[in-house]
Image: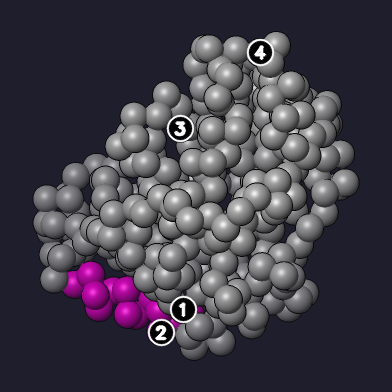
């Protein structure tokens, strides 16, 4: 496996290949990330993973400085999965000058849910992904695949729309959320949890599953009852010591509130949630 830190070295490593399959990450890898690599491997003739903690998607009060950085352990895990190339640039390499040009996603998608509670987050995500696509795919002559996890549901939708609207020659592949045996969605930020918090953390996924059941039971009455169902779910978590940002029922196609027709159409809804447990903010979702 090649580990490269500069754009020139990345291009040299990829020069013999035509069809990269790419997995962008911020490192601190767990089995969810490794599943993305397993998904990517059969898609191209070279499998590339990036490891880069992207300052642009962190607000000043968030955990950029303390985000776990475990490059050697990450590379060992990627090598064991048969990854071919790891691109681990420094901040100076990827942003040699202040990034004045940025990708601005549409407000109706980027300023709701995660974007509401983390203003500017999707600008940072879209900008770094666009830049990483240029780094990895610039020399490709064949199909180009990029694999993203469904745990970051809204992020994946933003990236898909960006690829579509900029006519990028990239196919975005979604991989299912990987979970611990108790149902907790795997996340690098799970490492922040204390032992007691880890035992409690599964309650977010349980609350979302309960909200999904309630939404299905409401059927055509969902638009009228949705706010009440969401408030009840949030209060239940808050009663356990959480600080919920949102637990919500949306339609899959655009993450807007569902209509009565959406509520009675099979496989049209998704429940999403974000909540803070102690100092750790967790997100999760389930398609309904």
Tell me how far mark 3 sits from mark 4, CA to CA: 19 Å
Q: Is residue 212 visible?
A: no
Q: Which residue is mark 2?
A: 235
Q: Is residue 176 left or right of residue 197?
A: left
Does the magenta run of residues contain 2? no
Q: Residue at x 45, y 27 (%)?
A: 170
Residue 90 appears in the figure: yes
Instruction: Please report the residue visible at 71 percent of the width from the left and 52 percent of the height from the top.
Output: 92
Within-10-Å neighbours for mark 3: few <14, some 14–19, many 20+: some
Pointer 3 or 2: first along the chain: 3
How far apart marks 1 and 4 lie (CA) works out to 46 Å
- Magenta stretch bounds: 225-237
Q: Is residue 227 magenta?
A: yes
- Residue at 82% x, 34% y is 3
For label 1, the SS is strand
Q: Which residue carries the number 4 mark?
A: 17
The answer to whether residue 37 is above or below residue 13 is: below
Q: Which residue is mark 3?
A: 172
**Which of the two discs, 3 and 4, sits closer to the camera?**
4
């Amino acid at each position: 496996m090649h580990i490269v830190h500069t754009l020139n070295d990345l291009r040299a490593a990829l020069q013999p290949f035509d069809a990269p399959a790419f997995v962008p990450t911020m490192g601190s890898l767990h089995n969810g990330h490794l599943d993305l690599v397993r998904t990517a491997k059969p898609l191209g003739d070279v499998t590339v993973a990036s490891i880069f903690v992207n300052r642009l998607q962190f607000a000043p009060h968030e955990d950029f400085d303390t985000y776990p950085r475990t490059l050697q352990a990450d590379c060992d895990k990627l090598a064991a999965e048969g990854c071919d190339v790891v691109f681990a640039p420094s901040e100076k390499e990827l942003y040699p000058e202040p990034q004045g040009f940025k990708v601005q996603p549409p407000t109706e998608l980027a300023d709701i849910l995660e974007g509401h509670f983390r203003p500017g987050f999707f600008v940072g995500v879209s900008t770094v992904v666009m830049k990483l696509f240029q780094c990895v795919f610039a020399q490709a002559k064949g199909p180009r695949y990029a694999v993203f996890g469904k745990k970051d549901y809204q992020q994946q939708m933003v990236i898909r729309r960006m690829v579509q609207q900029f006519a990028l020659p990239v196919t975005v592949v979604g991989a299912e959320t990987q979970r611990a045996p108790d149902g907790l969605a795997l996340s690098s930020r799970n490492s922040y949890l204390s032992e007691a918090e880890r035992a409690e953390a599964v309650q977010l996924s349980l609350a979302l599953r309960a909200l999904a059941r309630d939404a299905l039971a409401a059927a055509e009455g969902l638009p009228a009852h949705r706010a009440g169902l969401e408030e009840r779910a949030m209060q239940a978590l808050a009663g356990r010591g959480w600080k919920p940002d949102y637990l919500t029922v949306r339609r899959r196609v655009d993450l807007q509130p569902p209509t009565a027709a959406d509520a009675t159409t099979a496989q049209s809804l998704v429940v999403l949630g974000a909540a803070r447990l102690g100092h750790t903010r967790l997100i999760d979702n389930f398609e309904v």
